[in-house]
Image (cartoon, rainbow, N blue to C red):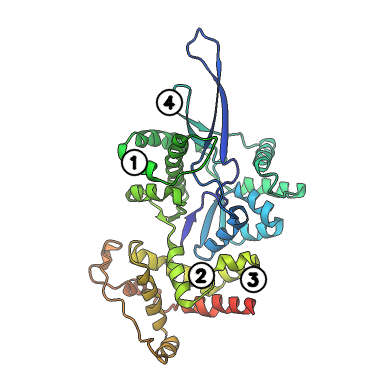
Amino acid sequence: MSKIFFPYIYHGSIAHKYYIRFDFRMSLTEPPKKFSTIFSTGIREEYDKEFEMAYIHLLDQLLLYDVCMIPVEDVVYLMGTIGYEYTMKIVNSGGVHLYDALSNRIGMYFGPFNQPMMFAGKSPENEQKLYARLESMIKPLRYKLYIKEEWKPSIIELFKSAYFINDIFGLFKDTESETLYEYGKDDVKKILNLSPKVESKNVEEQQVKANRLLHFQYYKRISELLKCNYMYIPVELESLYEYYADSTVANKDNLKDIFAQITKLERIPDIPKLIDEGILTIDDILDIRKSKASKNFRKWIDKLNQAAGSKHSSELYAQLYHEACMSNNKFKTAYNSKEGSAVRTIGLLAISSVNPALGIGVTVFDYLVSNGLNDFNPSDYTREKLKKIINTKSN
């Protein structure tokens, strides 16, 4: 089963920036002074149309992964953006599971003596506190979100039923200690300095870089705790992922890159654009993903990724897709009847590094057969299901 850890839907979502104000003393004999700071997660704050398009990104992921693990806070974003009915359809589709880490209010900032200091927010989870937490989530986005009062009890119930990470302090303590240790390494600092800049008037660049490292370590731990075999990696964290890839259990979310090659080969229009233009609806996406062909395709593309590995060229994935289509006589006959559509072979690929039991010289196609996918033709999904419904809706 392909399960992806999705730490947020909307990048600049609930409490993206944090403001901290506290007392500190230079010495025991001096009166307390006030220290204030604002810090950011270090992830992009907002791109054009990102707020409106964020739920579309989730729908796109639902076509590729069996389960998307999202924080329960993002239910607030979903309801405020697409309404109660559609949010509940998505949550109840089986493709989305909610987890609760008592909000992602963690951060590194630099205190009065320019020493790195950590912050982690946590509140008791009784009914009254849940409502207070909900209101604090809505407040920063009150000019963008539309939340009806009658939806709030349902949101609270979703909070209560989400997978609860009860050792959040232990989780954060481990993250804090490793972040501070790693932050002292010259090669890590070099990676952070080369990562994309965030334009901000209120947050120092030093804080932004440090929080990228902190949140990567945090996401890495939660994805492992939730037993996710994929992890969504925003562009700001890609260099960190590459650096820590050997110690990261979850794979980078590269199924979308493989799927892009397949849709290009099949001349399938851009699905997020179709949703944005209203040609495909949320109901269409949920109907597509629950079909048998869709389930088999998610299994097939997951196995394909495991077999080929993420470092192979994009052309290889197109070849592998074509080869799989040729395994079906119906499509083989159709393709071979056209000029220049001779079967393309993929040659031998050494994939023993992915699965040593297979040995050297085993083709990726053989690997798929060994995983019980020899009778599946991906065109059953791409042409017979996906492309057909797009053509029907477009005409």
Separation of marks 4 and 2 at Cα, in angstroms: 51 Å
Separation of marks 2 and 1 at Cα, in angstroms: 42 Å
For badge 1, the amino acid type reads: Lys
Residue at the spot of label 4: 115
Earlier in the chain: of badge 3 and badge 1, it is 1
Answer whether residue 371 is visible to the viewer in this image: no
Earlier in the chain: of badge 3 and badge 4, it is 4
Earlier in the chain: of badge 2 and badge 3, it is 3
Separation of marks 1 and 4 at Cα, in angstroms: 20 Å
For badge 2, the amino acid type reads: Lys
Label drawn at residue 239 = none
Separation of marks 2 and 3 at Cα, in angstroms: 23 Å
Residue 183: percent from left, percent from top: 37, 35
Q: Residue at x 55, y 35 (%)?
A: 202
Q: Which corner quadrant of the image does residue 393 belong to?
A: bottom right
Residue at the spot of label 3: 279
Residue at the spot of label 2: 295
